[in-house]
DNA sequence: AGTATGACGGTTA
DNA sequence: CTAACCGCCATAC
């Protein structure tokens, strides 16, 4: 894939400022999310495992700051439900790319990406 | 170095 | 099913 415009920023919990500059950790996370195939998803925890650092919480914080440069809708909670603020839009985007959705959640048994 | 914060996860009630 | 609680960990200040 083409490199994402490094214009975005990472950093977690930015209080008091718009966006800080990307951190190595944020790039790791965005890199993994960027590789999720259309119609497939990963849980926040899955992303943390694939990067080898952090937890679902830290992954979520990174995406909250610049998930805009990656297919953010492909990262959902362990329950299969997209994060609250993005619920409707995420479900719409996922359904559009052929991801199995049931009610307000993704059918993880069918849509979970194996990371390969 | 210590405290606060957050697009999470798992357990317990 | 919902709600509360605690553990987790990178980052900001």
Image (spheres, coloured by chain):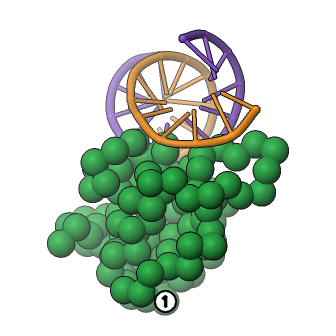
Chain colours: A green, B purple, C orange
Between A47 and A98, the residue placed more toward the observer is: A47
Please tell me which residue lies in front, A34 or A42.
A34
Quarter of the figure with residue A98: bottom left
**A16 in relation to A103, above or below:** above
Q: Which quadrant holds residue A41? A: bottom left
Using residue A101 as the reference point, say whether residue A84 is left or right of it. Answer: right
Residue A99 vs A44, above or below: the answer is below
With A65 as the anchor, is A63 left or right in this view?
left
Residue B6 x, y percent position in the rendering: 64, 43
| Chain hosting mark 1 | A
The kind of secondary structure element at disc 1 is: helix
A69 lies above or below A54 = below
The answer to whether residue A39 is above or below residue A114 is below
Q: Residue at x 45, y 61 (%)?
A: A27
User: In which quadrant of the rendered view does residue A37 lie?
Assistant: bottom left
Q: Position of residue A47 (x, y in %)?
A: 35, 56
User: Residue at (71%, 58%) from the top-left corner?
Assistant: A19
Q: Could you say where residue A28 lies in the image, as x and y percent from the top left?
A: 39, 59
Residue wearing tag 1: A96
Q: Is A58 displayed left or right of A36 in the figure?
A: right
- Please tell me which residue is depicted at 70% across the width and 46% down the height of the picture: A14
Residue A85 pos. (x, y %): 67, 60
Q: Report the front residue among A51 and A91.
A: A51
Quadrant of the snapshot with the C terminus of chain A: bottom left
Residue A77 seen in this snapshot: no
Q: Which quadrant is the N terminus of chain A positioned in?
A: bottom left
């Amino acid at each position: 894939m083409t490199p994402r415009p490094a214009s975005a920023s990472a950093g977690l919990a930015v209080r008091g400022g718009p966006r800080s500059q990307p951190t190595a950790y944020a790039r790791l996370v965005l890199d993994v999310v960027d590789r999720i195939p259309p119609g497939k998803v990963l849980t926040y925890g899955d992303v943390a495992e694939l990067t080898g650092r952090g937890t679902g919480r830290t992954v979520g914080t990174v995406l909250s700051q610049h998930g805009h440069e990656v297919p953010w809708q492909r990262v959902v909670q362990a329950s299969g439900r997209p994060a609250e603020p993005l619920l409707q839009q995420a479900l719409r985007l996922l359904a559009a790319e052929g991801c199995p959705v049931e009610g307000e959640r993704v059918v993880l048994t069918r849509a979970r990406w194996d990371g390969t």
